[in-house]
Image (cartoon, helix red, strand yellow):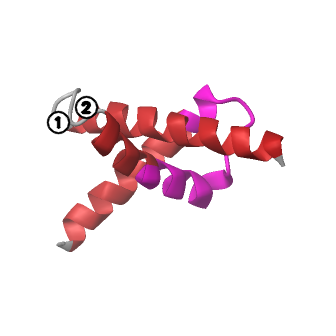
């Protein structure tokens, strides 16, 4: 993976994690946590949605945000159960 693709992936993850933190009130983890949640959310969205929103930058951000929201929802369920 080239450095530019890595930077773009981190930027998309950061935006997606930030948006997911806004959508899921009180579920954010700070900037580093949101980047990690966004990146993992993008991976989840890749499996669940399979490129449903297209391959452009906006489509990737939407997909990654949906995946991050799913991840934050699962984390909140696990937190409640413990």
Q: At 53% from the left edge and 51% from the top edge, which residue is drawn?
A: 37
Residue 56: which disc?
Answer: 1
How would you rate the neighbour count of disc 1 (Cα within 10 Å): few for under 14, some for 14-19, many for 20 or more?
A: few
Q: From the viewer's side, name the closer residue of 57 and 70.
A: 70
**Residue 41 magenta-drawn?**
no
Whether residue 39 appears in magenta in the rendering, the answer is: yes
- Residue range highlighted in magenta: 20-40
* The N terminus: image quadrant: bottom left
> Given the current orientation, which residue lies at the most extreme front position?
81
Q: Does the magenta stretch mainly form a helix, a strand or a loop?
A: helix
In this rendering, the answer to whether 34 lies above or below 76 is below
Q: Residue at label 2?
A: 59
Q: Measuring 44% from the left and 46% from the top, which residue is drawn there?
A: 41
Residue 74 vs residue 51: left or right? Answer: right
> Is the residue marked by circle 2 packed among few (<14), some (14-19), or many (20+) residues within 10 Å?
some
- Residue 43, placed above or below residue 56: below
**Gap in angstroms between the C-alphas marked 2 and 1:** 5 Å
* One can see residue 27 in this view: no
Question: What is the quadrant of residue 55 in the picture?
Answer: top left
Identify the residue shown where x is 43% and y is 32%: 66
Q: Position of residue 46 (x, y in %)?
A: 29, 43
Secondary element type, mark 2: helix
Identify the residue at horizontal 23%, vertical 38% (top origin). 57
Q: Secondary structure at mark 1?
A: loop
Q: Nearer the viewer, residue 9 or 45?
A: 45
Q: Taking 62 as reference, is 36 above or below it?
A: below
Front residue (pair 27, 78): 78
Q: Are marks 2 and 1 in contact (CB under 8 Å)?
A: yes
């Amino acid at each position: 993976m080239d450095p530019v693709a890595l930077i773009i992936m981190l930027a998309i993850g950061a935006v997606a994690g930030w948006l997911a933190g806004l959508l899921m009130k009180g579920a954010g983890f700070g900037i580093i946590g949101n980047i990690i949640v966004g990146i993992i959310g993008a991976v989840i969205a890749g499996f669940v949605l399979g490129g449903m929103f297209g391959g452009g930058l906006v489509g990737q951000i939407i997909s990654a945000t949906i995946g991050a929201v799913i991840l934050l929802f699962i984390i909140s369920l696990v937190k409640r159960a413990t």
